Amino acid sequence: MKERYLDIMLKEYAASDMYPFHMPGHKRQPMDLGEGERLDITEIHGFDNLHHAQGILREAQERTARMARADASFYLVNGSTSGILSAVSAQTKRGGRILAARNCHKAVYHSIFLQELKARYLYPMSTEFGIQGSISPEEVEKKLEEYPDAETVLITSPTYDGVVSDIRAISRAVHARDKVLIVDGAHGAHFGFSKGFPQAALEMGADIVIESLHKTLPSFTQTAVLHIKGERVNTEELRRYLGIFQTSSPSYLFMAGMDRCSRVLEKQGGELFERFEERLDRFYDRAKNLKCLHVLDRAGEERDPGIYMRDRSKILISGSQAGISGQELMDILRRDYHLELEMASGHYATALTSICDTEEGFRRLIRGLEDLDGKLSSRSRVQRNHGVSDSRLYSPVRRRMELRDAALAEKETVRLADSAGMISGEFLYLYPPGIPFVVPGEEIPQELPEQILRLKRLGYDIQGPEDYTLEGIKVVL
Ligand SMILES: Cc1ncc(COP(=O)(O)O)c(C=O)c1O
């Protein structure tokens, strides 16, 4: 086989006409940072130390905090992942209890494992579009009532699909019991800069908010921030864990990119967001005319009671009326239109957009969809049911053991196809988005093995089991 090299592959991809409707949010537009290698240092004389910032990094983080109206902001060079691990570790006691949105990212589950937490889940509402909806304040109230010993509540808002929860009402409920609200806002770093997007979670009362700059703003992959506000945050412990979960050689290229991102937003944010919103509006107006492809409308909540609010920068395109799966749709858009989307789930594919998307990019997306829509409309439309439904895949699962106990218990490998009813020793999730169908310690639901194997046949990337072929899964003896 011909030897392949990463740098060469990347250059070829960069030189191609493939348009990126995926992360990072800079969309491969120049960030005026010159040749990377000339700026690539870590902590040397005259520069500051991220873990004890006293100089230039302290000033940069204070600037970020001012813009976010936070008490303090911390640069993360190991992604939101490091912020989530640090925040959960700082705000819980080992072996304590957390209330976490079931649709949270695997980083949250990893923090549950590390802190040996007893996690109880907040289930999102179901939606007509077939995605996971918002977490309702009522669900939070109910679970707080049921588990008064929970120390911390963690919600993901917005989700990968752009679904936002009512953080104001949720924080009120959480604070009424003197608990801490952590919001995983990894997909919402662009909130708070314009009225066209939901308000930032920190402004709505969250105590800790973690945002991946790289997902939706012009910033390098891996860059993120953690904002804190209010008296409930255990800042000392938070600093300790940030020191543990972050590299001791933070890249100045990453951090300079973050600082530049703040500066650009401060100086030109208004204008950039205005142009972005106009492009989105034009896109959504035209998308209404598609005949068999269906784009979730910009507001989402106007029609769907399961969605409190939506971030319209995430464009969700369903192929179900056209009889194609999200994965097929994503593959066709790549092959025939050179549009690379972010991800596919059961019946839809997601295009991520940002202030760095060009007029040309938006035009190519809508024209591609219109052309494909025409082709799909003219073929006899068989409403194929792929037999995989998000609401079934993500429905509540019976817990038989705590996560960590199961993950570390003695296990045996059985055929995935025969595993229904057994206690899973592994995670099972589709990546992206990385939200588990089953976590260690939970009983594998009757229908799940068949659904997972069907997803695999449809070309989805199912992860979790050590056996990547998905022949076998480890279950607790
Ligand atoms: C909801 C959510 N939270 C956290 C993360 C982790 O973010 P990062 O890749 O910046 O570590 C992701 C990654 O996709 C995510 O989707």
Image (cartoon, grey):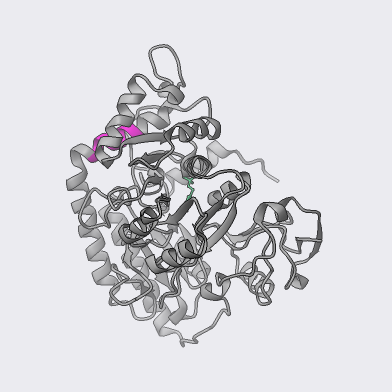
- Of residues 382 and 225, the one nearer the viewer is 225
Q: Residue at x 46, y 61 (%)?
A: 144
x%, y% of residue 420? 73, 73
Q: Position of residue 434 (x, y in %)?
A: 55, 57
Left or right of 336? Residue 468 is right
Q: In this view of the protein, which residue sits in the foreground, 276 or 247?
A: 247
* Looking at the image, residue 216 lies above or below residue 66: below
* Dominant secondary structure (helix, strand or loop) of the stretch shown in magenta: helix
Q: Can residue 40 be seen from the camera position used here?
A: no
Q: Is residue 298 above or below residue 192?
A: below
Q: Based on the displayed image, in which of its 4 quarters is residue 304 positioned?
A: bottom left
Q: Is residue 259 magenta?
A: yes
Residue 45 location, quadrant: top left
Question: How far across and down, in percent of the image, does residue 67 sit?
Answer: 25, 39
* Residue situated in front as seen by the camera: 430 or 341: 430
Task: Specify the segment rendered in magenta.
Answer: 258-265
Residue 471 on the magenta segment: no
- Location of the C terminus (image quadrant): bottom right
Res 97 seen here:
yes
Q: Residue at x 69, y 71 (%)?
A: 449
View extreme (top): residue: 45
- Residue 92 position in % (x across, y down): 52, 45
